[in-house]
Amino acid sequence: MTRYARYFLAAGVASCLMGGLARADKPADPAAVSSEDGKYADKDGRPTFNVGKDGKVDFYTYIGYVRYTANCMHCHGPDGLGSTYAPSLVNSLKSLDYADVMTTVANGKKDVSESSQLVMPSFGENKNIMCYIDAIYIYLRARSVDAIPRGRPQDHEPKPKDFSETEDSCMG
Amino acid sequence: MSKTFLTGLLTTGALLSSVLTAPPVMAQAPAAAGKDWSTPAGSLNGQRFSSLNQITNENAHKLQVAWTFSTGVLRGHEGAPLVVGDTMFVHAPFPNTVFALDLNNDGKILWKYEPKQDPNVIPVMCCDTVNRGLAYGDGKIFLHQADTTLVALDAKTGNVAWSVKTDDPSKGATGTDAPIVVKDKVYVGVSGGEFGVRGWFGAFNTADGKPAWKGYSIGPDSDTLIQPGKTTDLGKPVAANSSIASWQGDQWKIGGGATWGWKSYDPQTNLIYYGSGNPSTWNPKQRPGDNKYSMTIWARDADTGAVKWLYQMTPHDEWDYDGVNEMVLADQEIDGKPRNLLVHFDRNGFGYTLDRVTGELLVAEKFDPAVNWASKVDLDPKSETYGRPQVLPQYSTEHNGEDVNTTNICPAALGSKDEQPSAFSPQTGLFYVPTNHVCMDYEPFRVSYTAGQPYVGATLSMYPPKGDTNMGNFIAWDARTGKIVWSDPEQFSVWSGALATAGNVVFYGTLEGYLKAVDAKTGKELYKFKTPSGIIGNVMTYEHAGRQYVAVLSGVGGWAGIGLAAGLNDPHAGLGAVGGYAALNQYTSLGGTLTVFALPRD
């Protein structure tokens, strides 16, 4: 639960920081500059992907694919490509950064008018999503810059040794 | 077909409108739709057959668009309008607008109903904000709104006669199904199998909306209205609390078994028939046992809800093969004996033929040759596994376990057929079935339950069967033998309900947006017209001022809309296969429109 709470708080803080700011700039360079226990980070310390020359992906990108497809695909389409009722996240992540994504996932989003009925629920209380939100973000970040193709990643780095323990404590 | 039978059908059709205007009790449910189309399937037996015969296999090629109507809604348009007398009733997805159109005045809008609903219900609706249509009876139009409000509208004015809340969307329950009316009651079910809802099927009085009875899919006998010792399962009396006994712990309380499909009714037995959907979660490891009575065909007494018989098609589901598809009631001879049949094309790819009076299982055969998850259904009454599918271990996600990707399972989770209803022609004796020809990889894993949040527990990816480039077929099926008679391939899944008519024509729509007419005997295409959007609605027909019309709602979306922008994966492309699986958005775009067809006036 501790890790889960941290996600939630992080998202809340991000929400405050982002309030009222219009974002026109592109998200930062996704290149991985460091890694800890199989989880990669960009130069600003944001979670990111790592794809080897042979196409092998980091474990988080792989788990991100699995969890995205179980929890997000029903609305946002296979491989992040969108559907008739929710936007393509491959496109959205070209202009949204980590904090934007965390805020939207935790708080939800509404665009309801005469011509539009788009509603994303708040997933802040949903462990199936919040316990994997970094992985989902990492996967979509990779998709948004075309670092990985459609479909299930064919090969991935081994599961980090503390991954299962962290997962269990988050899922409760 | 005998002349007497045909005369009988025509008479019933002609009588229909007068019967309907004499509420509240229908003496005899019509055997076929005639001038009116007053219930979702045209008739309560679910046949989607019309006795109208102006449009025939000889002249269908001359069909033209007579008029069109926009619903103003962009989401997926399932279901079909109703016609009662001189009025057509058209429904739309969320916000669930209903229009009454004057057929005497070029479809002028007589009234419009638009409920105010909390938009927070939108994301609780798995797979688009669809609604499958309206029911008519007792001078009222019935609508089950997204927010689970069942509302009765005065058919003449559109004024709300009464409304009743059937469930709670904050817990993941939503209304998407088309009600039906039998005698003095209106019947609805609930959606939410992917949110851990416990499914139920309920009857409400048409007069005032007062609940008459409610039978859960899962739970103690007092909730399911199963009568231990009396209710039968494949001919054998059911033991006490057999549902709960097939679950571990409290999982049954969030166990699914949603009931969002079509309903049918047999006046001879006074039984109402429908199916229940998948158990929750999609991860079979989290719910050991048969998970009764998800994935089940139900026969309940229409007055009391007491269960006469039931049959679970896919015990302990491992693939999301919901059992909610339509139950078509038809009388045919098997082995020289006249039988009262119930025919059901399940998501799991088997076409089932049962005796609808006793629940005896007569035929269970694959209606898509690609189906591979089970070798067959055991039809030996002496066998210990009687009635159960013989599951192949390599396609068993239970056997392969959590966090393992089980590959090349056919059909995919959306089934060899989803909700798109089939039609039956008493003239040819054949069933006309819109099908999906899609396979999948399925990986289950542990999930945690939060009320009102998605509760899925598996990742899947879908693609056409290896070596094939078509993702759908429109087939003619002989339910007496369990054999495909003819099969028309379609590039995309056929997601539109079929219509059969006495003119020996069968109609259906395609995801690209074509309305197609084919010869009922041969499947030969007679006519096609590309409507403004992809068709996931059901084709219906009616007669007005002496002229036969055919109508269909287009407006792509629903489960099919998931693949609209993306198309499906082609896992074999890397192996050099030809990738013919273009995205649907190269063919069609959103928008709800009704298109009405007729022969030209001479």
Image (spheres, coloured by chain):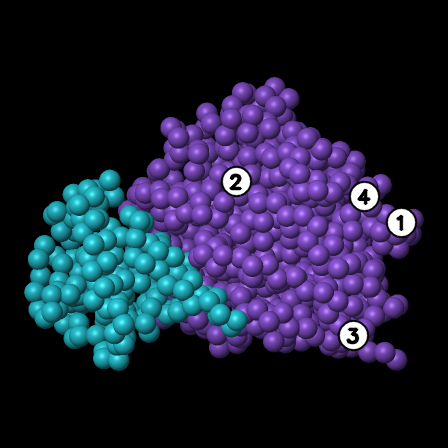
Q: Is residue B89 visible?
A: yes
Q: Which chain is purple?
A: B
1 or 3: tag closer to the N-terminus:
1
Residue B364's spot in the image, x, y percent? 60, 41
1 or 4: tag closer to the N-terminus:
1
* Residue at which label 4 appears: B24
Residue at image position (20%, 54%) is A9
* Above or below, A57 relative to B357: below
3 or 4: tag closer to the N-terminus:
4
* Residue at which label 3 appears: B106
Per the model, the C-alpha gap separating discs 1 and 3 is: 32 Å
Front residue of A81 and B221: B221
Q: What hue represents chain A?
A: cyan
Chain ID at mark 1: B
2 or 4: tag closer to the N-terminus:
4
* Residue at which label 1 appears: B8
Residue B430's spot in the image, x, y percent? 72, 52
Per the model, the C-alpha gap separating discs 1 and 4 is: 24 Å
Chain ID at mark 2: B
3 or 2: tag closer to the N-terminus:
3
Chain ID at mark 4: B
Amino acid of disc 2: Gly
Amino acid of disc 4: Pro
SS class, disc 1: helix
Q: Which mark's residue is nearer the viewer, 3 or 2?
A: 3
SS class, disc 2: loop
* Residue at which label 2 appears: B199
Residue B595's spot in the image, x, y percent? 69, 72
Q: Which mark is residue B586?
A: none
Say whether mark 2 and mark 3 are on the same chain. yes
Amino acid of disc 3: Asp
